[in-house]
Amino acid sequence: MNKISKRFPLSIFPTSLLAFAIFLSLSKSAPAQIQDVRVIEITAKKYEYSASPIHVKSGTKVQLKITAADHDHGFKIAAVPDGAVTNGTAGLIFTSPQDCWQLKQGETTTIEFLAQASGKYTFRCCHTCGVGHRGMKGQIIVD
């Protein structure tokens, strides 16, 4: 019986060490997931978006942070690439899809999506903002 009590603490050590190693590996993987998100800041102002074209790699999680500088604007983008069938497979998977995101003056609107399929995706203003409104557009290119 005395021999068993002497071995018992030694058998706990490898198990504890293994559990600690697993804990450390899991805690390091969580920040890696956060780093996978590509944040892109865009300013919407009189008839233009500040960043265009925007290139992202397929498989990238994207977070657009769009600020309307001068007055209210809008942001509209199709989930399928330009020229594709509108009811086809979505190439951009939005976390909260909308037909037209409203961009309020002085506020930042966040739009999140997964760039899943290669192609060109044209975005445009969907809130009438003046005579140059129709020319207010940009492009996201998924490589």
Image (cartoon, helix red, strand yellow):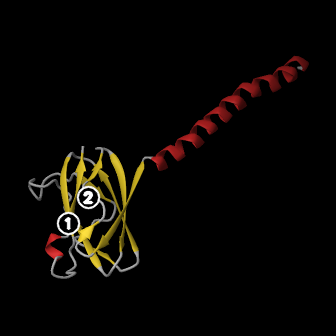
Q: Quadrant of the N terminus?
A: top right
Secondary structure under tag 1 reads strand
When the figure is inspected, residue 79 is found, relative to residue 27, above or below; the finding is: below
Vertical arrangement, residue 84 with respect to residue 125, above or below: above
In the rendered picture of this protein, how many numbered marks are placed on residues? Answer: 2
The residue closer to the viewer here, 60 or 2, is: 60
Image location of residue 143, percent across then percent down: 24, 43
Asked which secondary structure carries label 2, the reply is: loop
**Which kind of residue does numbered mark 1 sit on?**
Lys
Q: Is 3 on the left or on the right of 140, as rendered?
A: right
Residue 104 appears at what percent x and percent y? 35, 79
Q: Amino acid at mark 2?
A: Ser
Q: Earlier in the sequence, mark 2 or mark 1?
A: 2
Q: Which residue is mark 1?
A: 137
Q: Which residue is mark 2?
A: 52
Could you say which quadrant of the image residue 129 lies in? bottom left
**Residue 52 percent coordinates (x, y):** 26, 58
Q: Determine which of the numbered discs, if any, sits on residue 8 in the image.
A: none
